């Protein structure tokens, strides 16, 4: 692992942190994005009612964070999807897959008891930085 200091990533194109954490951190050639929920970055209100609608906003937020980091959705190495209800798996999976080109990243999906702001989906990713 690199001895380089951690760099904080911050962008107005993704929701502001609502707690003591960074939107994303760069360390070495890797960007670690905090879990994203379906918040509109300007209004900080929840977007969508269904898992699929919410997943689309989450992926837009992740894309904005990765772009601000010097990365992209094509550079995602690992993701974790947190679902309020595993019955949303198929619809969230369809939306998620439409944002990520092949080869798709490694992934885990888990059902949880509750998510921030009572949303249906949260996704976190780890991505490589683009070669400079």
Image: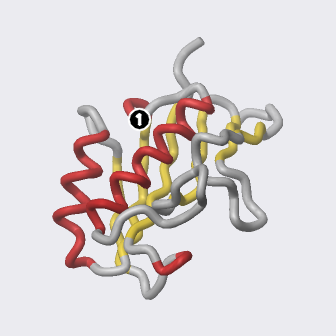
Residue 14 percent location from the top left of the image: 58, 46
Q: Is residue 33 above or below residue 70?
A: below
Q: Picture quarter containing residue 52?
A: bottom left
Q: Residue furthest top?
A: 132
| Quarter of the figure with the N terminus | top right
Residue 81 percent location from the top left of the image: 39, 63
Q: Residue furthest front?
A: 43
Identified at 39% across, 68% down, the residue is: 121
Q: Is residue 29 above or below residue 104?
A: above
Q: Nearer the viewer, residue 108 or 122?
A: 122
**CA neighbours of label 1 inside 10 A, class few (<14), some (14 to 19), many (20+):** many
Q: Picture quarter containing residue 91?
A: bottom left
Q: Nearer the viewer, residue 79 or 73?
A: 73
For this view, does 85 lie left or right of residue 68? left
Badge 1 marks a residue whose secondary structure is helix
Q: Is residue 118 above or below residue 128?
A: below
Identified at 30% across, 38% down, the residue is: 100
Q: Residue furthest bottom?
A: 113
- Per the image, the residue denoted by label 1 is 73
């Amino acid at each position: 692992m690199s001895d380089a200091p951690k760099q904080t990533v911050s962008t107005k194109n993704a929701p502001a942190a609502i707690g003591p954490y960074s939107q994303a951190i760069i360390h070495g050639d890797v960007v670690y994005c905090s879990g994203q929920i379906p918040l509109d970055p300007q209004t900080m209100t929840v977007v969508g009612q269904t898992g699929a609608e919410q997943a689309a906003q989450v992926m837009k937020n992740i894309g904005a964070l990765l772009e601000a980091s010097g990365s992209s959705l094509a550079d995602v190495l690992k993701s974790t999807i947190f679902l309020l209800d595993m019955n949303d798996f198929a619809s969230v999976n369809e939306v998620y897959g439409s944002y990520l080109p092949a080869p798709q990243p490694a992934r885990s999906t888990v059902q949880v008891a509750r998510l921030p702001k009572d949303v249906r989906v949260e996704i976190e990713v780890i991505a490589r930085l683009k070669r400079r």
